[in-house]
Amino acid sequence: MKFLKYILPAILVLTTMSCSDDDNDIAPINEVQDLMKVQEISNDNHTIEVYTKSGTLVQGYNNITIRIKDKSTQAFIENAVFTWKPVMHMASMSHSCPKSDLVKVADMQNVYNGFIVFQMAENEMEKWDLTFNYTINGTAYEATDFIGIPASDKKTVTAVTGIDGVRYILALIEPQNPEVKINDIIVGLYKMENMMSFPVVENFKINLDPRMPSMGNHSSPNNQDMVYNATTKMYDGKLSLTMTGYWKLNLMLRNQNNEILKGEPVTDVNEASTLFLELEF
């Protein structure tokens, strides 16, 4: 019994030490493990890593995640406050594009997230750059570099002028992976306030008429027009895809007075609207 009196406390101490060692060996969570790095944008002090799901930026809607690393310590920074500005440098002018705020992701330590809608692709003479302005502990920094925005195979973003003279940009956000079923469809709608400002357009309506031009231009049942979602600040609807292949998503843009600003109904004599987006799967 005296043996047990001394051996049991010893076992408890060893067990506690073992548990403590195991806790210290737990690897930190990789907060970008499901993403792929697009590129790094650096200045003298920091490196900003840019991530998307595909590892590329595209003409159209881009959900973008970043994290920022201190060059001297190689530690990721948790308390940066960001703004960002994408700019297309053209031969005779420069302009920006629709974008969200860039904010810290809830329940994450060092990643920030937002979206950018690049309404046009780069070419040999015209390029996009991306500038990050940020503060850390009250000190301001800036980092800028060129980014690649190749042309998309399908029209997932379009810029049009309505009968009201306003320049609108529509971007397909969902479905990213369409299926033969009734899909949720989400579209972003923005207007060009000036060359650098593209605010969200609220409380409009977007009529939807999907067609398959190669299959007699047939449509599909149970589609729902897109209406404004005040929470997401995007437009939600239902897209019925009855088979795989190429679909033209014919649209009509209506203002708050239900006036058609752009687009036409599809009829026997009018096979497509002048306002449309595309997908193929």
Image (spheres, helix red, strand yellow):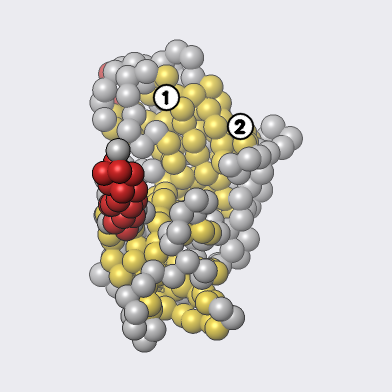
User: 55 or 245: which is nearer to us?
Assistant: 55
Give the farthest residue toward the right.
257
Judge left or right: residue 11 versus residue 88: left
User: 276 or 117: which is nearer to us?
Assistant: 117
Disc 1 and disc 2: Cα gap in Å? Answer: 15 Å
Q: Residue at x 57, y 50 (%)?
A: 190
In the displayed structure, 32 sits above or below 208; it is below
Q: Name the residue under label 2.
A: 227
Q: Position of residue 207 (x, y in %)?
A: 55, 29
Q: Position of residue 127 (x, y in %)?
A: 34, 70
Judge left or right: residue 19 versus residue 197: left
Q: Which residue is drawn at 49% across and 24% down?
A: 238
Label 2 CA crowd tier, 10 Å (few <14, some 14–19, many 20+): some
Q: Which residue is drawn at 59% across and 81% down?
A: 138
Q: Mark 1 points at which residue?
A: 183
What is the total number of numbered labels drawn onto the structure image?
A: 2
Residue 69 visible in this rendered orientation of the protein: yes
